[in-house]
Image (cartoon, helix red, strand yellow):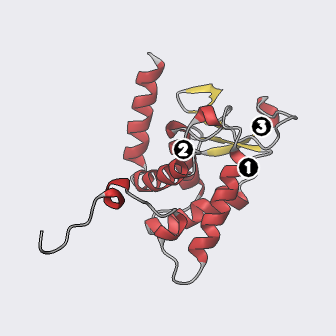
Amino acid sequence: QHATVRTTSTVKDLLEKYPKAKDLFVVVKYLLFVNGLNEVYTGGIGSYALLLMIVGFLQQKDSKKESIGELLKNFFLYYGMEFNNKDKGISIADKSLFDKESRGWFHPRQPHMLSIEDPSNKENDVTRSSWNIRLIQTLFQSCYRALNQPGKMLESIFPPIRIPYLYSRKRRSRSD
C-alpha cells in the first residue's frame, strides 16, 4: 500500500477514534501557523506529526470528561513542561511511550529532539526534522501560563489579526 494512502487511512481512523483531537488540532495548528512553526522545512511541526502528538497526549491522559479548553491547556502543559522528550518517544500504535536510546532514536548532538513513531511505519520518526522543538516548547509554556491566568481566554494566546483590506479602504461619510 502506498504511504499516502496509509497515512490518509491512519488520520481518518485516529479522528474517528479520538473526536476531540480535531478541535485541538485546529487551534494548535493555527497557533503554530501564526508563529511560523507549522512547516517541517523550517523546523516546525507538520500536520501529521501534530495530529500524532495530540493523539499521544489523549492516550496518556484521561480526557473523556475534560472540556476542549481544559484539554488545550493540559496539552500545552504536557508538551511545554512535563513530557520528557530527551529520553522518551511516542508510540500511537502501542498507546505508550518508549525509550529513545533503546530504539536507536536518541541523537547525542540533539538530545532534545521529539520522536514520534509513525503508526503506519514503525521505523519512521515523523518528527525527526522538527529541529525547532525547543522554540515550540517555549511557545506551549507561554500559552499554558497565559491560559492559566484568571480571566484569560483563548484569544490571549494569539497575536492580533489585522486584515489589510479593512484598514486600506477609504472611509465613507454618511452623506455619500
Badge nearest the viewer, 3 or 1: 1
How many numbered discs, if any?
3
Picture residue at 75% right of the left edge, 44% below the top? 88
Q: Residues within 10 Å of mark 3 (few under 14, many from 20)?
A: many
Front-most of residues 99 and 131: 131
Instruction: Name the N-terminal-most of marks 3 and 1.
Output: 3
Label pair 3/1, CB-CB below 8 angstroms: no
Disc marking residue 100: 3
Q: Is disc 2 placed on a helix, strand or loop? A: helix
Residue at the limit of the structure toward the right, as seen here: 108
Q: Is residue 137 left or right of residue 36?
A: right
- Toward the viewer: 98 or 132? 132
For the point 45% across and 52% down, the residue is 21
x, y percent for residue 25: 46, 51
**Percent coordinates x, y for residue 38 in the rendering:** 55, 43
Residue 130 found in image quarter:
top right
Dot 1 lies on which element? helix
Q: Looking at the picture, which amino acid does disc 3 mark? A: Lys
Residue that sits furthest to the left in the current view: 175
Q: In which quadrant will I find the C terminus?
A: bottom left
Q: Amino acid at mark 1?
A: Arg
The residue at the point 40 percent across, 23 percent down is 5
Residue tagged 2: 50
Q: Which residue occupies the foreground of this view, 97 or 176?
A: 176
Q: Which one is earlier in the sequence, the residue at label 1 or at label 2?
A: 2
Residue 37 visible, this angle: yes
How would you rate the neighbour count of disc 1 (Cα within 10 Å): few for under 14, some for 14-19, many for 20 or more?
A: some
Q: Which residue is mark 1?
A: 134
Could you tell whether 79 is left or right of 29 in the image? right
> What separation in Å lies between label 2 and label 3 (alpha carbons)?
19 Å
